[in-house]
């Protein structure tokens, strides 16, 4: 059992209090990204250099050896196997971001959407370029996978909502699909709920529960079960792919980020909005209609205001690009200064 535990513990990084504070800050960045519709926290995890550790940490939750140790109530041994410190620090940051930044970002998205999208466009574009450096040698096969991922994400983020059944099994499926998307760079889990026709039902069910009405609470229960199953199962697959086909997997993920640029293009024209069963427009917390389909358009440079907006958008995109470059530089310097892993004896 000692060798098994050591094998599981391999990959846990030894961090100081300052290191865990840094993880919490990364979690705040991930949470802020999840708030923005169409932007994935997985993209931010990739940018911040914690993506693979995040996947491997989640993967442990479904590992039979971890579950067996936990089932025998050997809690201390289970905690040695499970990278709980990492997930706690990151999760705390995500929670802080959702609580403190959701209102600010929602307001900015309504009032200054071009500037917010410009900043995220710069982030995603630069991150795809920076991550591409992780691939030691580009081959035609890897370039093909990158193109496949790009086209797939481009098509996916342009989908319109489907009509789907209101049954327990589909809610579990929706939860699984949405949770998988949340850890995939370039794909938003909330957006996929919209595509599967479950975003509105999720919001209405949560609001009903808050009001003390629990008749439809089974939806959230099934959604949660599906999310847990999807997250743990998909993490196993991603972890295996990283271990066996690292560069090929990274090529696909870069493609997903590039394809998602369709969603974060700053200049858009709304063409369709979310409606309920009676055909009434659904409003968000700010009282605005929820957009479900947009067309990307070119910036209007025919007026002085349009030119000023375009210049400021370029500046903010540049800020996003610069931020990624600085983060990558800091991460590379830290990698050279500190050991990668520790082996925890049992």
Image (cartoon, rainbow, N blue to C red):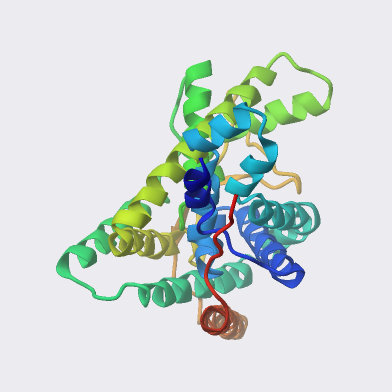
Residue 92: quadrant of the picture: bottom right
State whether residue 198 appears in this view: no
Side of 139 relative to 22 (left or right): left
Identity of the residue drawn at 46% across and 45% down = 235
Where does the image place residue 2, in percent across and percent down from the top left?
52, 45
Where does the image place residue 125, in percent across and percent down from the top left?
45, 73
Identity of the residue drawn at 55% across and 78% down = 331
| Vertical side of 42 occupied by 143: above or below | below
Side of 116 relative to 267 (left or right): right
Identity of the residue drawn at 65% across and 49% down = 84
Residue furthest right in the image: 212
Residue furthest left in the image: 140
Where does the image place residue 135, in percent across and percent down from the top left?
32, 72
State whether residue 245 appears in this view: yes
Identity of the residue drawn at 63% across and 42% down = 77
Numbered marks: total: 0
Residue furthest top in the image: 215
Residues 137 and 103: in front is 137
Where does the image place residue 214, in percent across and percent down from the top left?
75, 17
| Vertical side of 280 occupied by 81: above or below | below
Side of 95 relative to 186 (left or right): right
| Vertical side of 156 occupied by 226: above or below | above
């Amino acid at each position: 059992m000692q060798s098994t535990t050591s094998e599981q513990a391999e990959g846990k990084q030894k961090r100081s209090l300052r290191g865990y504070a840094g993880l919490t800050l990364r979690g705040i960045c991930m949470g802020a990204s999840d708030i923005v519709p169409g932007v994935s926290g997985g993209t931010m995890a990739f940018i911040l250099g914690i993506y693979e550790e995040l996947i491997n940490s989640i993967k442990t939750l479904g590992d039979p050896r971890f579950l067996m140790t936990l089932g025998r109530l050997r809690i201390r041994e289970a905690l040695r196997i499970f990278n709980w410190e990492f997930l706690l620090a990151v999760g705390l940051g995500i929670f802080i971001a959702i609580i403190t930044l959701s209102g600010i970002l929602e307001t900015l998205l309504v009032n200054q959407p071009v500037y917010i999208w410009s900043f995220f466009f710069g982030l995603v574009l630069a991150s795809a370029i920076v991550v591409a450096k992780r691939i030691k040698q580009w081959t035609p096969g890897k370039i093909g996978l990158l193109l496949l991922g790009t086209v797939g994400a481009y098509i996916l983020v342009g989908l319109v909502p489907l009509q789907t059944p209101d049954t327990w099994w589909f809610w579990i499926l929706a939860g699984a699909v949405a949770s998988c998307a949340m850890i995939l760079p370039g794909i938003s889990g909330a957006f996929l709920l919209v595509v599967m026709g479950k975003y509105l039902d999720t919001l209405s069910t949560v609001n009903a529960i808050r009001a003390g009405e629990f008749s439809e609470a089974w939806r959230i229960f099934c959604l949660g079960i599906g999310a847990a199953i999807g997250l743990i199962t998909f993490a196993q697959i991603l972890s295996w792919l990283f271990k066996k086909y690292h560069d090929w997997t990274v090529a696909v993920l870069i493609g997903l980020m590039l394809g998602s640029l369709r969603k974060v293009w700053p200049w858009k024209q709304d063409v369709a909005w979310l409606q309920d069963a009676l055909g009434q427009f659904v409003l968000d917390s700010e009282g605005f209609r929820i957009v479900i389909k947009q067309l990307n358009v070119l910036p209007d440079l025919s007026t002085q205001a349009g030119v000023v907006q375009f210049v400021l958008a370029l500046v903010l995109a540049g800020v996003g690009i610069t931020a990624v470059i600085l983060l990558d530089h800091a991460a590379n310097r830290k990698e050279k200064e500190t050991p990668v892993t520790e082996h925890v004896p049992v």
